[in-house]
Amino acid sequence: MSATHGSVHSLWTVAAEAPSIEYAQLSPTLLVLGAAVIGILVEAFAPRRLRYGAQVLLAFLGLAGAFAAVVGLAVGGYATEKAAVAGVGAIAVDGPALFLQGIILLVAVVAVFTFAERRLEPTAHGTRVDSFAAQPAAVPGGEGERAAVRAGWTTTEIFPLLLFAVGGMLLFPAANDLLTLFIALEVFSLPLYLLCALARRRRLLSQEAAVKYFLLGAFSSAFLIFGIALLYGYAGTVSYAGIAQVVEGSVPSPSPALASAMASDALLLIGGALVVMGLLFKVGAVPFHMWTPDVYQGAPTPVTGFMAAATKVAAFGALLRLLYVVLPGLRWDWEPVLWGVAIASMLAGAVIAITQTDVKRLLAYSSIAHAGFILAGVVAVTPSGVSSVLFYLLAYSFVTLGAFAVVTLVRDAGGEATHLSKWAGLGRRSPLVAAVFAVFLLAFAGIPLTSGFAGKFAVFKAAAEGGAGALVVVGVIASAIAAFFYIRVIVLMFFSEPSPEGPTVAIPSAFTTAAISIGVAVTLVLGVAPQYFLELAGQAGVFVR
Amino acid sequence: MSGFPLLTATAVLPALGAVATAAVPAARRAAAKWLALAVSLGTLVLAGLVVARFDPGGARYQLTESYAWIADFGVRFELGVDGIGTALIALTALLVPFVIAAGWHDADPVPGERPAGRWRPTQGFFALILMVEAMVVVSFAATDVFVFYLFFEAMLIPMYFLIGGFGDRAHAAGEAEGAKQRSYAAVKFLLYNLAGGLIMLAAVIGLYVVTADQLGTGTFSLQRITEARAAGELTMAAGTERLLFLGFFLAFAVKAPLWPLHTWLPNAMGESTAPVAVLITAVVDKVGTFAMLRFCLGLFPEASAWATPVVVVLALVSIIYGALLAVGQRDIKRLVAYASISHFGFIVLGIFAMTSQGQSGATLYMVFHGISTAVLMLVAGFLISRRGSRLIADYGGVQKVAPVLAGTFLVGGLATLSLPGLAPFVSEFLVLVGTFSRYPAAGVVATAGIVLAALYVLLLYQRTMTGPVDKPEIERMPDLRRRELAVVAPLIALLIALGVFPKPLTDIVNPAVEHTLSDVRQTDPQPELPAVEAAE
C-alpha cells in the first residue's frame, strides 16, 4: 500500500510546486485548445452576423498554426533524437505522436472546409446556411425551429466544438499515462456526440445517432476507466513506462505489496483487455463496431467524414502506443486476440457491406473492414508495422474525407440523396463528380496507383514480415470481397440509366471543392509516389519510453 | 542504360495521348479520333524503334532503364525487354491503330440523343484504349515484379470501362437488357481478374519477405533475383516456392484464360464491341501468357517443373473444351471467344512443354493469334454492325452480296484454323512439335484441337456466308467500306508474309527462349532415333 501512497503523494507535491511545463513541445495541443476557448468567447460576445466568418477564420488559423508547430517540432528533431516525455510525464512528444498529430490537423483543416460549406443547402429566407441545424435546442419540426430558420440562424458553435474534439484527438495518441488517455478520450468524444446530433435535415435520425453513439461511447468509456483502475491496482502507477516496467518484472526494488500484485496476472490481463476493448470501440473493429453504421448514417455528412477519418487516426495511435509501450511484455496474450479481431473485422465489414443500400452505411462497413486491415499492421509488432500503420492512416483518412465530401454534393429535394438507387447514372449527369468518387472507391478497394494500394501493400508487407502470413491471405480474400461492392457503386454510377427524377449534383463553393481536390491529390500522390511519405512514416516509427 | 529512355517513351506517349484525347471538348469528336489515331501511330513508330534497336544476339535484357521509385518497398522502376517482350510490344503497338480505326464510329452518340452536360463517351472510348496500350507496354517491359504487378492490375480499370461502357448498337435482347448484360460482363471480368490479382498480391508480398530474409534487403528486381539464385545466395524451400508459384500462376491463368478460370472471357468478348474484344483477347490477355514465361518460369523454375503435368492437362482441356464449345455457339463473337480459349490452351501447352520449339512456338503463337483473331473479330464486327445481330442464324449467303467482306472473313477464319501458308500455322506446328518431343500423348490430344478448329471455322463460314440470300436485310448489305478495308488489308498481308517468311520474328524470339529454358534448367529432349529401330 505504501507504494501507491507514495506515488499519489509525489504527484500531489509536484503539482503544488508548479511543475515545469514544456510549452513549446505541447504547443500544437495548446494552440488548438486556445483557439477553441476563443471560439467560445466569440460565440458569447460577437454579434451573430460576424460569427461565421470569425469562427471559420479562427478555426483555420488555429489548426494551421498547430500544424506549423508540429512541423517545427518534427524538423527540430523532436520526432527522433530529441523525442521525450513532456508535461510531467503525461504526454509523449515522439515520432508517432507528431506524425499522427500532423495527420489529424490536416484532416481537421479539410474538415473545417466541409463544415463551412454554405452553398449546398437552398437558402433559408435569403441567408445561406450549412448542413447543421438552425437551432439545435429547438424541437424538430416545432415552432422554435421554424422561427430559427426564418431568422436565418446557423449553429456556429460547431467550430469550437470541432476544435475541442481535435484538441482531444491530438492528446489521445500522445498520452503517456492512462489518466491522460482517458481525459483525452472524453475531450474528443463529447464534442463529437454533440456534433452528431446537429444535422439540419432528418434531425430525428441525427439525434438518434447521437444518442446511440453517446450511450455506447459511455459504455466503452466505462470499460476503459475500469480497465485503468485494474491496471493501477496491478502496477501501482498509471504511467505507461511504469506499468511496462512492472509487466516486464524489471522494477529495481518492488515493495512487498507490489511484489505480491506482480505475482498474479489476473488484474493485468483483465485490466489490459478492458482498456484495449475501449480503444477497439473507438476504432470500430468487430465485435465493437455496432454503433458505426447508425452513427455514420445519421450524423451530418461533414461530421461523418471528419469522425471517420480523425477518430480512427487518433484511436489507432493510442492503441499502438498502448500495445507497443505498455504491453509488449504481454505480446503473446494480446496478439492472438487481435488476430481474431482483425480477421473478424476484415471479413464481417466486407461481407455485410455487400448488402447495404445506403452510401453512408456502405462507407461505414467499409471503414470496419479497413480497421481490420490496419490491425493486420498493428499485430506485426515491428518498427515497419508501426510505420505501415502510420502510412495507412494517412492514406485512408484523406480518401475517407474526400468520399464523404462527395456524398454531400449529391442531393435531391430531401437533402442529400444517400440511397444508392439514387446514384444510378450519376456518371452521365456529372462525369467529373462520378469520376472523382470512382477514384476514391478504387482507392478504398486498393487498386494499384492509388494511395489505398500503397497503404495496403505496406500493411500486408509488415504483417508478412512479422510472421502473420495467414492474416495476409485473409486480408487478400477480404479485399476481393470488398472490391465487389465498391465496383457495384461504380457500375451504378456509370453503366445505369439515370432516372428522370434522380438527384442533382449541387455546385459547391470553393470550400468543398478544395476539400475534394485535396483528397484526390493526396490519393493520387500517395499512390504514384509514396516514397517520401513512407520514409517520413519510417522515421516516425519509434515510440519514446 | 545510356541515351534516350525508349521503353518509357513508348509507354508515356499513349498515356499522355489518353489524357489529351480525354480533354478534347465535347463538340470536337472527330478531332479526338484523329488525335488518338495519330498517337497510336506515333507509338507504333517508337515500338518500331524498339525492334530496330533490339539486338537478338546481345544481352538478355536490352534497352534497360532503372529509376529509383519506392525504396521502402524495394521497388525500382526497371524496364528492359528480351526478344519475347520486344515481339509483344510490337504486336501491341501494331494492333492498337487498327483497333482505333475499326472502332471509329463505335462510340458516336446515338442519333437523336442529346448529349448531356460534360458526358463525352467518344473521347472517353479512345482515351481508354490508349490508356490500356500504355499499361500493357509497361507490363511487357517491366523487369521488376512489383512494377509489373502494378500495371497488370491497374489495366483492369480502363478495360472494365471499355467493356461496360460501350457495347454493340441494337442488342438482340433490347437496349435495357443489353446494358444489363454488358455491365454483368464487365463486373465478371473485373472480379475474376481482381481476385486472381489479389492472390498474386499475397505471393508478391511473400516473394518480398523471402528476398528480404535471405538477401538482407527485399527486392523485386528480376535480374537481381535470378543472379542471386544462380549464385546460391537465394534458395527457396520447395514448399514456399510452390505456394508463390501458385499465387502468380493463378493470376496469369485467369488472365490468359485457362480452363476452368475462363468463364469471364465469352461474356466480356460477347458484350463488348469488336475492337474492344480484339483488345481483350489479342493484347491484354497476352500479358497473362507472357507473364507465365517471364515470371513463373523465371522466378520459380523448380515449382514450374513440379506443376507441369497439371498445367499441361489443363491446357489440353482448354484446347478441346474451347473448341467443342466454339462448335456449339450460336453467337459469332462468343464463338471467337471460345476459339481463343482453345488457342490460349495451345500457348500454355507450348510454354510448359519446356522445349525450345514449344516455347518459341508459344511466343509466335501469341503474336500470330493476335493478328489472326484481330482479322476475324474485326470483320465479324463489321458484319454485325450491318445486320445488328450477333446470331449466326440471322445470316446466310453474305458472300453473294458482299464478296470482299466474305473473303476477308474467310482469310481470318483460315488463319484461325492454322492453314499452312498463313502465319498461325508456323506457330501451331512448332508448339505441336515441341510438345510431341516431350509429351507425345499430349501432342496427339492437342492435334485433335486442329480438327475441331476446322470444324467451327468452316461451319461458321458456311452458315453465314454461303447459301441462298433469303433475308431482306442481307440483300441490302453493303460490302466493306474503304476504312474497313484499310483496317483489314494490312493485317491480312502481314498474316501471309509472316506465314511464308517468319524468320525475322523467330530470330528475335529464339535467344530469349533459350534464356528462359536455361532459367528452368531444361534442355530439349534428345530425339529418339527411329533409324536405329528401323535397322533392327
Image: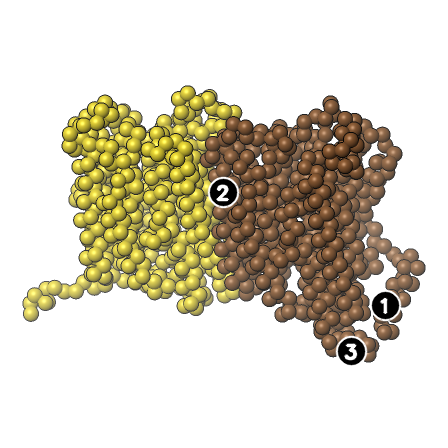
* Badge 3 density bin: few <14, some 14–19, many ≥20, Cα 10 Å: few
Q: Which chain is yellow?
A: B
- Dot 2: element: helix
Amino acid type, mark 3:
Ser
Question: Disc 1 or 3, which lies upstream in sequence?
Answer: 1
* Viewer-nearest residue: A505 or B241: A505
Residue marked by disc 2: A488
Residue furthest front in the image:
A142
Estimate the spatial distance between the alpha carbons at disc 2 and disc 3, rounded to whole Å. Answer: 59 Å
Q: Residue at x 33, y 44 (%)?
A: B266
Q: Residue at x 64, y 49 (%)?
A: A292
Q: Name the quadrant containing residue B374.
A: top left
The colour mode here is by chain
Residue marked by disc 1: A7
Q: List x then y, in percent, for residue B440.
A: 20, 61
Side of B32 where B368 appears, left or right: left
Q: Residue at x 40, y 59 (%)?
A: B246
Amino acid type, mark 2:
Arg
Dot 2: chain letter: A
* Badge 1 density bin: few <14, some 14–19, many ≥20, Cα 10 Å: some
